[in-house]
Image: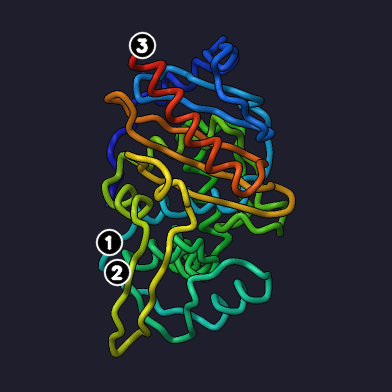
Amino acid sequence: MRIGGFIGSAVLALVVGVASPAAAADAPEVAAKSAYVVDSAGTVHFGKRETRRAPVASLVKVMTAYVVLREAQLSDTITISAADVKYASSNGATTAALRKGERLTVRDLLYGLLLPSGADAASALARHYGPGKTAFVAKMNRTARSLGMSDTRYTNPDGMPTPGNGGYSTAVDQVKLAQRALDDSTFAAVVGSKTHKVAKTSVHRAHTWHNSNKLLSRADEVLGVKTGYTKAAGYCLLFAGERSGKRVVGVLLNDQNERRFETAERLLDYAGEQIAGG
C-alpha cells in the first residue's frame, strides 16, 4: 500500500526562518517549548523554536504507522510475541493490552498503535516489517530523509526513552510528516477515531481502545493526530483540523498535559481566523 502525494512539503521547507503571524499581537500565548502551525496552502500561522531539536516521545509512532502503511496490506495478520508484551510492560510504556499469541490484522494494530499509543503494537509492527526492530528503525530514518526531515533521527519505533530518548525531531519536521501521513485515508481514519472496538474471535481477545487525544472531543472539525509523553520530551501534541476551508496542522512540544489541548484548540481557531481574514 502506497501513501499518496504530499501537498506543500516544498513550501514548508522554504518557510523556516521566515517571519510569520506568530508575532501578531492577537496570537495565542503558547507556553510549550516549541510550536509550529501551518495550513495546507503553506501559510505559517505560528512558530516558536520550530527548528529546535528535541525528543518527541510517542509522536514517533506517526512515522511507525507511515512506514507500515507503505509496505503492508491492512489484512496482513501479525502474531503478538512474548517479547512484544514484555517490552511494553517492562519499560512502563502505554500499551494496547495485547497478549502473547493473539493474531491481529495490521488495520487493528494501527488503531492499537495510535489510539492508546501501544508500545506493544509498535513492537509487533516493527518486528514484522523490519523485519526486526533494527531494520525497521533504519527504514524510519531513510523515510525521514526522503521527506526532507533533515533534523530528525529515530532510535526506536515508539519514542521510549531508550536508546537516546527515542531520537529527536523538530516542530517543523513533525508537521511535515503529519501533513504527508494525513494524505493517506487509512491513517486519517485511525487518528480521527475516538474509539475502536475489536470483537473477540478464535485468534484474539476483544479489545476496546480509546484515543488519548482529547482535542477530538473538545473542538469541532478536528482530524487527529497524536499525543506523546516522556520525562525528557514533556507532553507533546501533534494536531490537525479543518479551518476556513483549509487543513491546519500544528504541533506542541514539551508542554503541560491539559494545557496542550487548550492551546491547540486556540491555535486552530487562530489559524482559521487568519485564513478567513485573507
Of pointers 3 and 1, the one earlier in the residue sequence: 1
- Mark 1, residue position: 73
Residue 273 screen position, x and y as percent: 39, 19
Local secondary structure at mark 1: loop
Three-letter code, disc 3 = Gly
User: 32 or 122, which lies in front?
Assistant: 32
Q: Decide if residue 275 is on the left or right side of residue 114.
A: left
Residue 205 screen position, x and y as percent: 37, 85
- Mark 2, residue position: 76
Which residue is found at the position 51% from the left and 36% from the top? Answer: 264
Q: Is residue 68 above or below residue 206?
A: above
Q: CA distance from mark 1 to mark 2?
A: 5 Å
Local secondary structure at mark 3: loop
Examine the rendering and report whether any part of residue 101 can be seen: yes
Local secondary structure at mark 2: loop
- Mark 3, residue position: 277
Q: Is residue 87 above or below residue 265?
A: below
Q: CA distance from mark 2 to mark 3?
A: 47 Å
Question: Which-is-in-front pick, marks 2 and 3?
Answer: 3
Q: Is residue 230 above or below residue 29?
A: below
Label 3: how many Cα within 10 Å (few below 14, some 14–19, many 20+): few
Which residue is found at the position 68% from the left and 70% from the top? Answer: 91
Q: Decide if residue 23 is on the left or right side of residue 214.
A: right
- Badges 1 and 2: C-beta atoms under 8 Å apart? yes
